[in-house]
Amino acid sequence: MVRQLFLTAFFVLSLLFLCAAATSHWDSVPPRDHARQNPFQGRPEAVSAGALLYRDHCQQCHGADAQGDGRKKPSLHSPSLQSASDGDLEWFLRQGDLRHGMPSWSGLPQAQRWQIIAYLRSLP
Amino acid sequence: MNGIVSKSCQLAALVLLYAAVFGLPGAAQDKPYFVTYTHDLEEPGNIEVETKSAFARPEKGHHFAALATELEYGARAWWTTELYLDGQATVGDSAIYTGFRWENRFRPLMHEYPVNPVLYVEFEDISAADKTVLEVVGHDGEPDLILPNAVSRAAHQHEGELKLILSSNFHDWNISENFISEKNLGHAPWEFGYAIAGARPLRSAASGRVCTLCAEKFIAGLEAYGGLGDTRALTFRNTSHYLAPVFGWQLPAHMRLSLSPGFGVTGTSMDQVYRFGLAYEFKDADDMFFSRRKGKVW
């Protein structure tokens, strides 16, 4: 009986873990936002403008090299961010993650958010 | 009065000179409102020091200059706490400290919506000599501002204030509405007021140049605020209302300048109030005091 309970619990927990692992952070982005294209894509002047904006608003937490602190301030080179669409990133900048310390940048003009994303995409 | 204005002009000139010389980063996305709050909170770990001054002359009164010095701290991404220290100088009278205010703003919802609520709670220990006019409630009006300091400072007020802040960012515009209720903790009725404002930057996209005078560094808008009476008489009668264009300039080195000429639109309002604000943001200021923080980290 105990063994059966243990196996059932193990199975349920494994299933939950697999579900959690399969759910991407970006799954909560509305499809309309996910599909949006960066209007500044491929424009070098947007990258340089984005670099200045990054310095003003993002560098404080994510570092000049966008590597974060290796602990709780995330690197912007992470596979999760690389796999996100431009629309996902714009949505996330707008929303922030208040619970975990990331402010909402909805007060920045939308064009500037796209310029920051153009810069992030240019990072090696 | 001339001395006060002259010192303010000298301070502004120094700021502008500093801004022109140093090509250091600018700061945040703050709006240049003096009375209205938005849902933009202070970034976690940062401390912003801001002075908000008001220059005016009530009818049958003397010129005055009032100064509120604000220390704003981003405790969490969803919680900002602020301390205000207020004072004023009246021509032909005296210069006095008028009290302090401690306020907290909370974002109850963790996501961005078309309209974003913020809850505001304030305690103030302030004398009736305060002339910062950072909010107008109840039947506040010009007659409150003409009493001699020796008389008005004797009337001490312990007040609690609640605000519901609703704010939206839409197509580079910010539109904010504040509903204010204030209660003297003694035997006095609840007083009500409002503030609404809208503003947008002069240019949306950044130019990509390190500059001080680029259009994207400027923001302009309009603010309106006034009293709505109290629980005994919820009315526009004998209340003050102001219309005030607002201008903001994002300076280098985490500084921000705000200007606002306000115009009274009712008989109990002052004709004009000129406001001037200067803010400086200390990034990651709490790293000076704490090695690890819970709220800042991811």
Image (cartoon, rainbow, N blue to C red):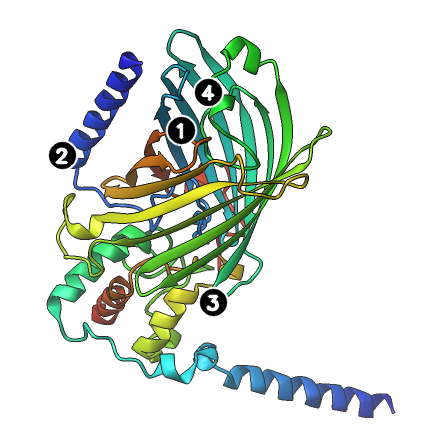
Residue at numbered disc 1: B270
Q: CA distance from mark 1 to mark 4?
A: 19 Å
Amino acid type of the residue tagged 2 in the rendering: Val
User: Quarter holding the N terminus of chain A?
Assistant: bottom right
The picture places residue B166, in percent across and down from the top left corner, at 49, 56
Q: Secondary structure at mark 2?
A: helix
Residue at image point 51% right, 40% down: B290
Q: Label 1 amino acid? A: Met
Q: State the SS at label 4.
A: strand
Question: Looking at the image, which residue is at 37% across and 45% down?
Answer: B223
For numbered disc 3, what is the local secondary structure? loop
Which numbered disc, 2 or 4, marks the residue that appears first in the sequence? Answer: 2
Lower position in the chain sequence, tag 1 or tag 2:
2
- Residue type indicated by callout 3: Tyr
- Which chain is disc 2 placed on? B
Quadrant (top left, top right, bottom left, bottom right) of the C terminus of chain A: bottom left
Image check: B183 left or right of A33? right
How many other residues sit within 10 Å of disc 3, few (<14), some (14-19) or many (≥20)? few
Question: In the rendered view, would you say B153 is above or below B105?
Answer: above
Q: In the drawing, does residue B211 fall left or right of residue B268?
A: left
Label 1 vs label 4, nearer the camera: 1
Q: Which residue is mark 2?
A: B21
Mark toward the viewer: 3 or 2: 3
Query: Cα distance, mark 4 to mark 3?
Result: 38 Å
Work out how far the residue at label 3 is from the one at label 2, CA to CA, in angstroms. 40 Å
The residue identified by callout 3 is B113
Q: Earlier in the sequence, mark 3 or mark 2?
A: 2
Do the residues under discs 1 and 4 have CB atoms within 8 angstroms? no
Marks 2 and 4, how far apart at CA: 32 Å
Q: Looking at the image, is mark 4 or mark 3 earlier in the sequence? A: 4
Q: On what subunit does the disc labeled 1 rest?
A: B
Numbered tag placed on residue B87 in the rendering: 4
